[in-house]
Amino acid sequence: MQGFDVRRTLAIVALLYLVEGLPLALFRDVLPVWLLRRGVSVEAVGALSGLSVAWSLKFLWSPLVDRFGTHRRWIWLALGAMGALLASLAADTGPALERATLIAIAAFCIASATQDIAIDAFTIALVPRGHEGSANAVRITAYRVALLAGGGGLLLLPAVIGWPGTLRVAAASLLVLAAAVAWLPVADTRPPRAARSATWLPFADALRPWSARPRLAAALGFVLLYRLGDQAMGPMVKPFWVVRGLTDEQIGLVSVSLGALATMAGGAAGGLYVERRGIPSGLYGLGLAALLSNLGYAAAALWPGSGRSGVYAASVMESFCAGLAAAAFMAFLMRICDREHAAVQYACLSALYALPGTVAGALSGWAVAHVGFAAWFAGTAALGLPAFLLLPAARAWADRADDEVAANDARRARDEGGAR
């Protein structure tokens, strides 16, 4: 791409995925600990993770993000709304999940899912083909650092300023990020006007090319199952730390230090591997490595004598391996999306892979209460294995996407040559 500035683009990608990761860190890591400290049960906290269904349903309103406004505006408006909602939660100190609390957290999830639509579309339009590996190394690193530093870093604050103050600091952070996005030194990205002529037309335009690709059902099954093991385990990680006796400060310190370093190493290694060996090889090798993190947590839960060192080792393994697998998977999703309808297509794909994890996560608290942490963590490792049987179909799907891009580029070159 002529005029492509690698450093500038990667810096923008890093900012966008810090923005995308922080709200999820708050929902997945900070709010569950806040609720557990207030006396809410593990089962209730697990059920609350079902509100992440907002990320699975975001495809329903993804055309609105393309049809109205700009991607940049959707991002900073969503950040502002999430900041206001967190500020409202700071006043809630009751021991039970009140209706107003549930509504506020649900609205927070919807706003976060909406900004994700805009961020993913912005990034797909910004990054040229062939640079997905390096972009995803930065993307995964920034995203995971936001998850770990945002979740872990904020957990250092309750001992100093209390939980209401911590939530207010989180709200202020979201507002600062909103201002940063509003002033990004880059032109906004949206589909051509013709592609936005009807609000729901992008669904038809986006899905029609996919219908001609080989082994579509099996490829969609791969997307559905590939990250299921990690998603099913996630809602019970912080409750496991709390049950094992870690304080808020200890949870925060291990997330910020060891977890952040392992994430950066995993994201960088995964991006480099994908660029050198290709997306299909990355999906297979790095995906299998990611399942080891589930077994690491199962081992830590099975042997309580391992103490805090066992929990820390499991955390480092999870952070590194999740970064590896996510780099390959996100490169695959970017590769099969058309730039003109990236918001709709990527929202549909990410919703598809998030859906089974949402269901499993909502049941995770109940499962842990009945079978224990060790059995649940080990079981989640098995959930990701069927996806690897469908990997050939995913490869065929990605190859067809590359063929379509090559054909379109050749057609465009012929048209430009004819015009001259």
Image (cartoon, helix red, strand yellow):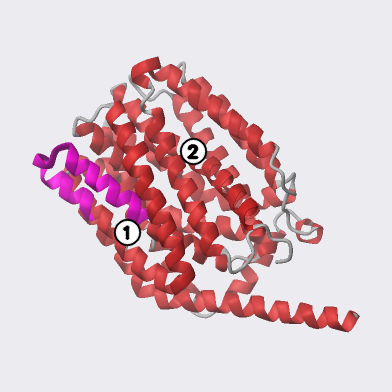
Question: 343 or 292: which is nearer to us?
Answer: 292
Left or right, 200 with reference to 283? right
Mark 2 and mark 1: Cα distance apart in space: 22 Å
The residue lying toward the viewer, choosing from 387 and 356, is 387
Is residue 371 in sight in this rendering? no
How packed is label 2: few (under 14 Cα within 10 Å), some, or many (20 or more)? Answer: many
Is disc 2 in contact with disc 1, using a CB cutoff of under 8 Å?
no
Position of 113 with respect to 209 (left or right) is left
Q: Position of residue 63 (x, y in %)?
A: 67, 53
Answer with the quarter of the image where residue 347 lies. bottom right
Q: Is residue 412 above or below residue 346?
A: below
Q: Which mark is residue 290?
A: 1
**Label 1 environment density (alpha carbons within 10 Å; few <14, some 14–19, many ≥20):** many
Q: Position of residue 188 (x, y in %)?
A: 73, 49
First-in-chain label (2 vs 1): 2
Q: Is residue 310 left or right of residue 163?
A: left
- Which residue is at 54% across, 29% downward? 173
Judged from this view, the residue extending furthest toward the right is 420
Q: Is residue 312 magenta?
A: yes
Chief secondary structure of the magenta span? helix
Indicate the position of residue 253 as horizontal and vertical percent values: 32, 33
Q: Which mark is residue 22?
A: 2
| Kind of residue indicated by mark 1 | Ala
Q: Is residue 188 left or right of residue 317?
A: right
Exactly how many numbered labels are in the figure? Answer: 2
Q: Amino acid at mark 2?
A: Leu
Residue under the image location 51 percent in, 58 percent down: 136
Q: Quadrant of the C terminus?
A: bottom right
Q: Quadrant of the N terminus?
A: bottom right
**For the magenta stretch, what is the residue range?**
295-322
